[in-house]
Amino acid sequence: MGRDGLKAAIVSIEGTNNDEELFVALRALGTQPEIVQLKQFEGVGVAPERVRRLADYRMLFFPGGFSAGDYVRAGAILAARVRASIGPQLEAFVREGRLVAGICNGFQTLTELGLLPGRPGGVLGTPEAVLMTNDSGRYECRPTFLAWTGGRFPPLAGVPAGRRYLFPSGHSEGKLVLAGDATARLAELEANGQLLFRWVAPDGSWASYPWNPNGSEGNVAGLTNPEGNVFGLMPHPERGFFRAQAPDWTRQGGAEGFGDGHAFLDAVVRFAERHP
């Protein structure tokens, strides 16, 4: 499948606000992105020609923002609506090996759906993790560094472990807390290759605040499901897609070209292109 035929759905409801940035990034990569209001998948309150089927897309993105105002918990209401309306379709989508991504609020949504860290087979279920209020007690917005752990994430297969990325962060509820014995569960996820990214300091060393902006145990900044086709991360690759979005572009070679977000999202698209 060529990229010009690679369709990506970006789920939108009231409060999501990074859907346009993702659209621009995915379109720049040659795919066919579409911002899809959840009601279009539900087939409720929209004209017949506006109804969409999840099965028609190769990739599904849950973007950042403050879906439903972050009431109850961040991502909880969007997750409940998805579960009630297209839950079986989403499970089938995951079982088929199609990519599901959650960025920031989208990561929060995927944990609320039980897809991250997830169970084998892509079954929606009781959440096994939550993204809680940052240790600082406030919204943290700044450039952050993260390192690829070398885990079980097919788009980054072949990329050396420790490869660093600069993505901006902006969240109030990003502290990953795992159910049960958190230390044992974290070790289990790491052994299973489900740790996608860890926060690191600019020199690649172990992060403390502010380089870990939320206090997440083990400096975890992103997770995958057991199969590696569902992933979530707190920082925003789409906000670091173009070189002009980097904090140092005026000092380091100007604004032309791409940033680390391009490298990461291009790897995601390349994998989807190879696995129709």
Image (tube, grey):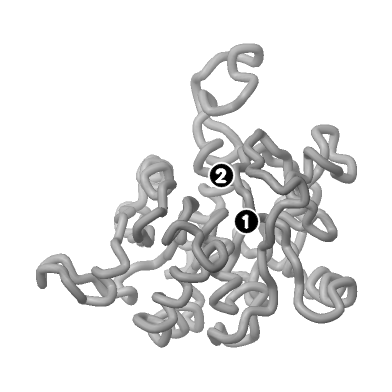
- Horizontal side, residue 147 vs residue 54: left or right: right
Q: Residue at x 65, y 84 (%)?
A: 119
Residue 25: x %, y % from top left: 42, 42
Is the N terminus in the top left, top right, bottom left or bottom right quadrant? bottom left
Q: Is residue 273 visible?
A: no
**Above or below — where is 101 with respect to 184?**
above
Q: Find residue 183 and name its label.
A: none
Hey, which quadrant is residue 44 in on the image?
bottom left
Between residue 29 and residue 18, name the one nearer to us. 18
Between residue 213 and residue 206, name the one nearer to us. 213
- Horizontal side, residue 107 vs residue 201: left or right: left
Residue 32: x %, y % from top left: 31, 53
Q: Is residue 218 visible?
A: yes
Q: Residue at x 50, y 59 (%)?
A: 70
Mark 2 surroundings within 10 Å by alpha-carbon count, few (fewer than 14), some (14 through 19), many (20 or more): many
CB under 8 Å between callouts 2 and 1? yes
Identify residue for label 2: 237
The total of numbered circles placed on residues is 2
In what element is the residue under mark 2? helix
Q: Residue at x 68, y 41 (%)?
A: 165
Residue 252: x %, y % from top left: 65, 15
The CA span between labels 2 and 1 is: 9 Å
Identify residue for label 1: 233
The amino acid on which the numbered mark 1 sits, given as a three-letter code, is: Leu
Residue 238: x %, y % from top left: 50, 43
In what element is the residue under mark 1? strand
Is the C terminus in the top left, top right, bottom left or bottom right quadrant? bottom left
Mark 1 surroundings within 10 Å by alpha-carbon count, few (fewer than 14), some (14 through 19), many (20 or more): many
The amino acid on which the numbered mark 2 sits, given as a three-letter code, is: Pro
